[in-house]
Image (spheres, grey):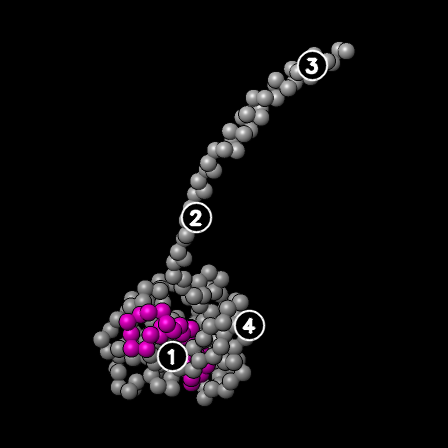
Amino acid sequence: MRFQGLIPALRIFALPLRSHSARALQRPPLPIPSATVLKAGPTIPFLGALFGSSAKTESQSNNMSYPDQRSDDAWQAVLSPEQFQILRQKGTERPFTGEYDAHYPSQGVYNCAGCDAPLYKATHKFKSGCGWPAYFDSIPGAVTRHTDRSFGMERTEIVCSNCGGHLGHVFKGEGYPTPTDERHCVNSVSLRFKEDEGQGK
């Protein structure tokens, strides 16, 4: 028949293919490149979307009473728009832009820019490099802490104990060589520095 001569030819043609496949199976597998492990760098909490108002934050500070109970209208009469946005609406100034970020006096007191209550001594301040004024402690009773669950995170908000003005947030366990291993990350706009340390004692 016409196809009888074709079958042996196909068998001969298939031999090198089978031999090639067998040799390929005998080859050692190619080495798989080892995965490169990237170590995550340190992050600064509340960067990014936090340079605005978090007035809708789930914070106990909205429900607490403070000695200074001025209305929003009264606050707007004495605060600049930026101060009102940060102190009363829980905004955040951009890093490395604040007046007191690189401010390291040997003595003095940082008061609340809203009600003038003393909050931090100059000796509490340290250089953190985070872009905001950093303090390892506050004047006893001057700062109140609340849980802040805004922006899908859980942080510790700090406010002025006298008027409830938003100061910033406090972070613990970051490894700074300070007596408390805490960093009070405070907006410069929330503060007013006074050289006389007597009122902060």
Q: Magenta region: which residues? A: 159-183
Marks 3/2 in contact by CB < 8 Å: the verdict is: no
Q: Secondary structure at mark 4?
A: loop
| C-alpha separation, residue under disc 4 versus residue under disc 2 | 43 Å
Residue at 52%, 80% (x, y): give it: 60
Quadrant for the C terminus in the image: bottom left
- Foreground mark, 4 or 2, reads 2
What amino acid type is highlighted by mark number 1?
Cys
Q: Which mark is residue 56?
A: 4
Instruction: Identify which amino acid the numbered label 2 is placed on.
Output: Ala
Foreground: disc 4 or disc 3: 3
Q: Position of 2 compared to 82: left or right?
A: right
Pointer 2 residue: 35
Mark 1 or 3: in front is 3
Task: Name the residue tied to disc 1.
Answer: 112
> Which quarter of the rendered picture does the N terminus lie within?
top right
In the orientation shown, which residue stands out farthest toward the right? Answer: 1
Q: Which residue is mark 3?
A: 6
Residue 179's disc is none
Which is nearer the N-term, disc 2 or disc 1? 2
Sequence-earlier tag: 4 or 2 = 2
Residue 19 is a magenta residue:
no
Between disc 1 and disc 3, whose residue precedes? Answer: 3
Give the mark nearer the N terminus: 3 vs 2.
3
SS for dot 3: helix
Residue sitting nearer the eye, 113 or 173: 173
